[in-house]
Image (cartoon, rainbow, N blue to C red):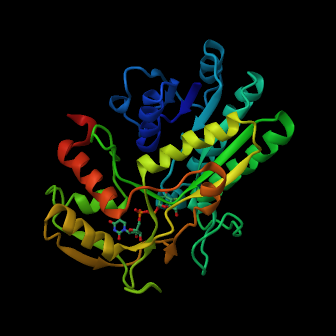
Amino acid sequence: MNLLVLGGAGYIGSHFVKLSIELEHSVIVVDNLLTGHKESLPKQAKFYEGDIRDRDFLNKVFKDNTIDACIHFAASSLVGESMKDPIKYFDNNVNGTIVLLEMMAKYDVKKIVFSSSAATYGSHEKMPITEDYETNPTNPYGETKLFMEKMMKWADKAYDIKYVSLRYFNVAGASSDSSIGEDHFPETHLIPIVLQVPLEKREYITIFGNDYLTFDGTCIRDYIHVEDLVDAHIKALKYLEEGNSSEIFNLGTETGFSNLQIVETSRKVTGHKLPMKIGSRRLGDPDKLVATYKKAEKILGWKPTKNIEDIISSAWSFHKKHPNGYKE
Ligand code: UFG
């Protein structure tokens, strides 16, 4: 297929591009490189540097290429930042998606796979979360992702654009050949931050709060390997290719790990003592987020294949090989 990957130079986008090229799809990447890295792209991908909110730019990309489907990763994605600067999130995420859907309607592109988030659900008592749980985001980031899903629902009714929305839980890990991985600045995610200690980039890890309502007091998250995650996108494309209706799926593993368990597993994987301190809570963190993936298994034939040690080991191999990210 001819795939247009928006945000394809980012952490998750680049893993999707790598897999699509391996599967012999023809790939066009659009990225403004604000957080993405051109170095993460294989040379077979055709690259356009630009912002999806720029109508003239995106129009040219659609005009110059034959596109069978869009895979939409382009968004700002930090919960904490979205609380401080919500307008940035509505502008980048919602406006960007408006322009994208406009071009899809104009150029008759009828399929889109969309990066959504567990943040659309907000806080819930009972785990694991199924797709029919109420959506009640507790931060602007989650609100924009939910709004983007809603725009796609109406674009389906009006222009017959079919979408698969994938609600990611905590994505981590790196490619099995350690060629690409997570390189954010500043880094905010737990696993890459923990690994900065054995990399000697920080002296200790601070765990944000140990008074949550969980078995050891620290937050529980459902970690999914980035390679498992991008495989679900390929399956979602196949699902749309087969002429199926628009759907929403959770992508998680149904297993939760506490922040202390992540530190403990990282000690095991790296062989480092990994000194740790307990700090105060981080604003907006829910106690526990765990997904059920049964719907994706039943309908897409997808299930996670990698466990938490695989995730941390692959991230560790990538960071050891690229201690300064893509900069070298
Ligand atoms: N944490 C620490 N110390 C750190 C960094 C993180 O204790 O230095 C803790 C957080 O407080 C949280 C856990 O580690 O309890 C996981 O935090 P992350 O920042 O790694 O991930 P989040 O669960 O906050 O966010 C992830 C994605 C978001 C998505 C969200 C869904 O990064 O994009 O899941 O709720 F929206």
Can I make out residue 33 in this image?
no
Identify whether 104 is placed above or below 209. Answer: above
Q: Quadrant of the C terminus?
A: top left
Residue closer to the observer: 38 or 314: 314
Q: Quadrant of the N terminus?
A: top right
Q: Residue furthest top?
A: 64
Residue at 34%, 54% in the rendered image: 187
Residue closer to the observer: 328 or 84: 328
Q: Quadrant for ligand 1? A: bottom left
Q: Position of residue 147 (x, y in %)?
A: 70, 52
Q: Position of residue 210 (x, y in %)?
A: 36, 83
Residue at 46%, 66% in the rendered image: 222
Residue at 60%, 68% in the rendered image: 138
Q: Position of residue 290 (x, y in %)?
A: 52, 70
Identify whether 43 is placed above or below 39. Answer: above
Instruction: Give the quarter of the image for residue 277.
Output: bottom left
Task: Give the left or right position of residue 50, taking residue 321 as reference.
Answer: right
Number of residue marks: 0
Residue at 47%, 86% in the rendered image: 213
Instruction: Give the quarter of the image for residue 122.
Output: bottom right
Task: Give the left or right position of residue 174, taking residue 220 as reference.
Answer: left
Instruction: Give the quarter of the image for residue 294.
Output: bottom right
Task: Give the left or right position of residue 59, taking residue 231 as reference.
Answer: right
Q: Position of residue 313 (x, y in %)?
A: 26, 56
Can I make out residue 38 in this image?
yes
